[in-house]
Image (cartoon, rainbow, N blue to C red):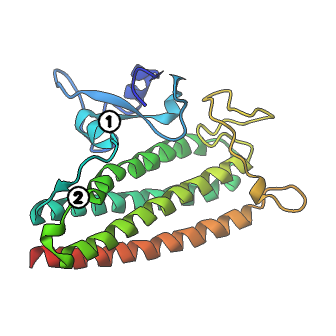
Amino acid sequence: MTSSEWHGDRDAVLERDDHTCRRCGASRSGDDETVLHLYPVGDVPLEGSVHESALVTVCSPCFASLQRSPAGDAVRLESDDLFDLVREMTQRQGVTISAVASFASLATSLPDELEDDDTAAPEYVRARREVLLAIDSVPSRLERLTVAETDHLGEAVTEPLEAVVDAATQLQSELRQLVGLGESIVAGLDRCHGCLEPLEAEDRCPTCDLERRDVDDWRDEDGEVAFQLLYDEVNESLQGASDTTETLTEGSATLATQLQS
């Protein structure tokens, strides 16, 4: 998706985010020449207007690092470069795991919270934006590892590297699934999973234009959304992600040992 295909309320998003990159914290003030961009997260339309609930402020370096490009020719990486790249990726995934766990906790609390008032809505929308941004921060590094030329470093490096890439790829999938489960909880409340606005019979949210998330798989025999089943699935998925994280941590440690030997 390019900036020419969609547009959003730039001033409103920058003001909401205090003219600060939500990924690294870089900010613009006074005569500062820091360039800030709008980055779309989630299932945004491929063209037309994008609602501010799905837009987040990022600086130029972060915007560039978020861009995914088709895999090209393998790039030869030496030990130090490979070590740094793996470290960056695992650090990013560490941040993402924490964000996903917080988002899942928030989502499971919404059925009770929304019974009282709508004060949880802004927190949910913000948390969803930032967890999706965190997830999007990993693939560019993961793709670089996938196509890296490392045969010259020997099997002692290539084998643990392959295990790290496999675990990181699996973890990304599990984290996206967890976010989807949180969104399904919201959809089960007849709310938009993007902006949390109430939905009636619409197929798309009239506020942000997201397509209504299907929750039929989570309905009981009476046609009601079985929230407890969703909660159980969230907990099980969190445990699965935790196990994968442990595998990734062990693999990264093994790889680091080989690279530094």
Q: Secondary structure at mark 2?
A: strand
Q: Is residue 46 visible?
A: yes
Q: In terms of sequence position, does the residue under pointer 1 or pointer 2 come before the other? A: 1
For label 1, the crowd category at 10 Å Cα-Cα, with few meaning under 14, some 14 to 19 and many 20 or more, is many
The residue shown at (30%, 36%) is 63
Residue type beneath disc 1: Val
Name the residue nearer the viewer: 116 or 33: 33
Image quadrant where one finds the C terminus: bottom left
Name the residue nearer the viewer: 123 or 92: 92
The residue shown at (51%, 46%) is 128
> Which residue carries the number 2 mark?
148
Q: Secondary structure at mark 1?
A: strand
The residue shown at (59%, 40%) is 194
Residue at the limit of the structure toward the right, as seen here: 222
Query: Label for residue 143?
Result: none
**Is 142 positioned to the left or the right of 177 in the image?**
left
Image quadrant where one finds the N terminus: top left
**Is 52 positioned to the left or the right of 30 in the image?**
right
> Which residue carries the number 1 mark?
58
